[in-house]
Amino acid sequence: MPAAAPDVLRILGLDPGSRLTGYGIIDVRGVRSSYVDSGCIRTPDGEFAARLCAIHAGLSEIIAHWQPQEMAIEQVFLHHNPTSALKLGHARGVALLAAAQAGLPITEYMPAVIKQAVVGTGRGTKEQVQHMVTALLKLPRKPQADAADALAVALCHGARLLTRSRLAEAGGGR
């Protein structure tokens, strides 16, 4: 199993969806973040319960293989369609369950906070997120939009942890 080096924090970022769940894994060492893996868990057509099972199984497999130490996930935002919002909530719940079963600490971020951390504005577009993720992680090509969003979640979490660590050091650990 490809575990991170002892002085490295491995973060799994998730952009949940009921049809496509993006994931992104980065290693963070100090101020440097490096790409590990990313992609999408694609669910089969058919019954909604089967799609939820596919998300859980896929995410459980990713966690077992890459052994992240923490997970960050995009928080639910309001949808115009209540049915879509409920389905997204179910997909998030299954993702949270898989992470909790693996004992991962979980942190949630609002989409605007993620975009602010990666793009510099809370109203960044998907294309801007893809561009910045590609640049920050020095990727040879842009990842798929859902994978880029998940990598952005992981990058946001890494930046927040670094900021908290620096604040603790500046305050004498108080």
Image: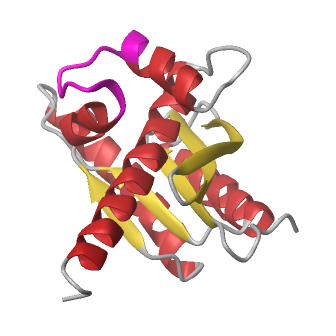
Single out the residue that lies furthest toward the top: 127
> In which quarter of the view is residue 121 placed?
top left
Task: Establish if 171 lies above or below 161.
Answer: below
For the C terminus, the image quarter is: bottom left
Q: Residue furthest right?
A: 1
Q: Nearer the viewer, residue 117 or 11?
A: 117
User: Which percent across, then down, holds residue 156?
Assistant: 37, 46
Nearer to us in this view, 60 or 37: 37
Q: Is residue 78 above or below residue 145?
A: below
Q: Is residue 15 at all visible to an observer of this figure?
A: no
Q: How many marks?
A: 0
The part of the image, by quadrant, that contains residue 30 is bottom right
143 is within the stretch colored magenta: no
Q: Residue at x 52, y 76 (%)?
A: 104
Which residue sits at x=45%, y=39%? Answer: 18
126 inside magenta stretch? yes
The quadrant of the image that shows the N terminus is bottom right
Magenta range: 118-128
Q: Position of residue 82 (x, y in %)?
A: 15, 36
Q: Please say which color scheme the image uses.
A: secondary structure
Q: Residue at x 46, y 21 (%)?
A: 132
Direction from residue 29 to residue 90 in the image, left or right: left
Question: From this viewpoint, is residue 28 visible?
Answer: yes
Picture quadrant where residue 11 is located: bottom right
- In the image shown, does 156 or 32 lie closer to the viewer? 32
Please name the residue shown 55% across and 80% down the image. 101
Q: Position of residue 81 (x, y in %)?
A: 16, 27
104 is higher (above) or lower (below) than 145: below
Horizontal arrangement in the rendering, residue 73 relative to residue 102 (left or right): left
In the picture, measured across the screen, residue 18 lies left or right of residue 57, that is left
Q: Is residue 13 rendered to the left or right of residue 84? A: right
Residue 173 image offset from top left, x and y in percent: 26, 87
